[in-house]
Image (cartoon, coloured by chain):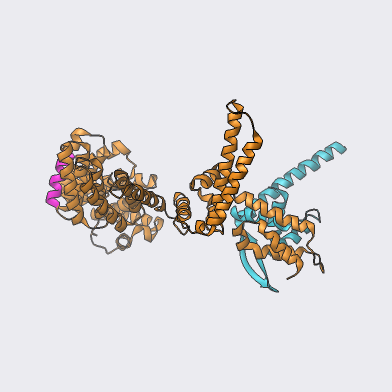
Chain colours: A orange, B cyan
Amino acid sequence: MTSAERRVRLLLRAWPRPDRIERGEEIVTTTLDLVPQGGDRLPMRLAASVVFGGLRARWRTHPPFQHWWVYAMYGAGLPPQWHRWMLDDLFGPGWSRRMYGRMCAFQATTYLALMFVLSAVGLRQPSWPTAIADVLVWLLVFVICGMITGSALSHSRWSRRRRVRCLADSGLDEDGRVDPLAKPRYLLDQDRRRRGADDRAALKRARTLATEMTSVGKLEDAVSLLSDTFERAKRVLPHTDEPTWRAGDQLAWALAQQGRTHDAVQVGREVLAAQVRLHGPDHDLSLGAASRFGHYLRSAGQLEEAISVLGDSFERSRQRAPDAERPTWWAGHELSLALAEAGRLDAAIRVGRDVLTSRQRLHGPDSALALHTATTLGGWLLKVGQVDQAIELLADTWTQARNAACSDAVVASGTCLAAAYWQSNRHDEAQVVAGILLSEVDTESLGSERAELLELLMTPATQDPDIDPGDGTGQSGPL
Amino acid sequence: MREPTFLILVALADAERHGYGIIREVEELSEGRLKLGPGSLYGALDRLSEQNLIRSTRTEVVNGRLRRYYAINDAGRIAVREEATRRSAVLQAAESRLGLAST
């Protein structure tokens, strides 16, 4: 290694560590290429360029003061654009000592600032030599303490906790990978450690974490956490306590999402009974619980009980909140689906029409909810032989779905419309709709079954196809 | 766009180059007026990569030394073209005014 190379490698320390790791060798190569032929010394111009380039890179990647201050002082997280710097700071060598040093420096600065303020308002005679001597003694004590506890400090629980806190607050797991559950999980751990797992705040944190788990599709973890939270809440909190039943409600929904509909029915029944007992059957919480319980019953195939529960809930909700999507029209839609699944298509159509009119009024005719409801209704009209009405409704829905660029509704209503045209012997129009769908929508979005059906319609010898309009529930969550 | 950035993009417009190659090309394009140091070069390359105007294509080891090659992206070509048009318009305006002033 030449002396020029040794010097470049030394000056490279001006660059942030991640840059040195990623492109240090490349910078060394380019710098040495620029050294005049036969020269063994590094020209001053090149040395200055390497150093200033490194300092500029440090400045560019360093978080601004207001973010850095709360990170360094309180262990708060940083926004994503500063994660690279933060991860290097947290996982780089000497992190604990750095954090300790910063805290000492902050304390010394605070002390000096306090002295300045007290002197300025006349509460203390200005005596800067004494104040500076105090600070120097403090710093000396901190440095000695830091040296004595150095190794212990870097491996201490304090150090680890502080690192985990910074990472979690930034939405990163303990290895620095992006994890949306990191922060709620950390907060739950904190509450459980400080106040115990049975504390009301800890139980609330557990529900928040479970909501996040559900939203990222970790249903098994959500169900496990909610089961534990629900059981604890029932045991610890008074039975009149609302959070207990909210946990139960969330658990039932997560179970249903997971496909464990019979377990969902069991928990849903318990929650509904508790809400009715606590608030009466006409309270919003009871009506919401009833509509969801009806949904679990329908999903579990217990259609007669579902119709009874949903019918009652729908009527009560309608009286109480005629303009509320939830629980009123959601319950109405669930009721119409349960009726259709039980083979009572006329009743399903009657309720479905009410739901459609209200959803069009509440959300607009081109909203996803209204378009899905209309498609479902069109499918039922077709099944009971009211083909002309079905065509009129589906053609209107298909046009609105295309204008609103609602791709799910375009596919569902278009497929239904093509089948309806075919059923009424308007084969040319059926083929036009099927052709548009096949050319405009890719097979993946179309689904293999629908694609096959549409291909079939394009074949001249096709008999009446069977259609499935879907349930058009547009469900998003329990609360 | 600052001149060093523009010249780096122009240097990469016709071929992929490594760091030293870019510095030499920029020097040639500016007729020896602009001599980029390694610090300025890698700062500019970082910014251009972040803006998705250039990309790193490959690395190779020559005589035990690592070289990384850079190439311009489509967005980079568009940016160079726009900047060149702008500079050309300014040049034409300057020439036109100087021409008017001399008559």
Q: Main secondary structure of the magenta part?
A: helix
Position in image of residue A21 (x %, y %): 60, 63
Among the 4 quarters of the image, the one containing residue B30: bottom right
In the picture, which quadrant includes the N terminus of chain A? bottom right
* Left-right relation of A171 to B50: left
> Nearest the camera: A293 or B54?
A293
The answer, for residue B64, to whether it is visible in the render is yes
> Nearest the camera: B49 or A238?
A238
Q: Which residue of the protein is positioned furthest toward the bottom in this rendering?
A: B63
Q: How many numbered dots are placed on residues in this image?
A: 0
Q: Which residue of the protein is positioned furthest toward the top in this rendering?
A: A122
* Left-right relation of B47 to A426: right
> Nearest the camera: A183 or A275?
A183
Q: Is residue A312 magenta?
A: yes
Above or below — where is A197 with respect to A447? above
Position in image of residue A303 (x %, y %): 14, 52
The answer, for residue A350, to whether it is visible in the render is no
Above or below — where is A8 with respect to A216? below
In the picture, which quadrant includes the C terminus of chain A? top left
Q: Residue at x 65, y 71 (%)?
A: B60
Position in image of residue B51 (x %, y %): 60, 52
> Nearest the camera: B88 or A67?
A67
Q: Residue at x 59, y 33 (%)?
A: A115
Q: Residue at x 56, y 57 (%)?
A: A94
Specify the segment rendered in magenta. A303-315
Q: Residue at x 41, y 53 (%)?
A: A182
Position in image of residue A402 (x %, y %): 37, 47
Q: Is residue A271 magenta?
A: no
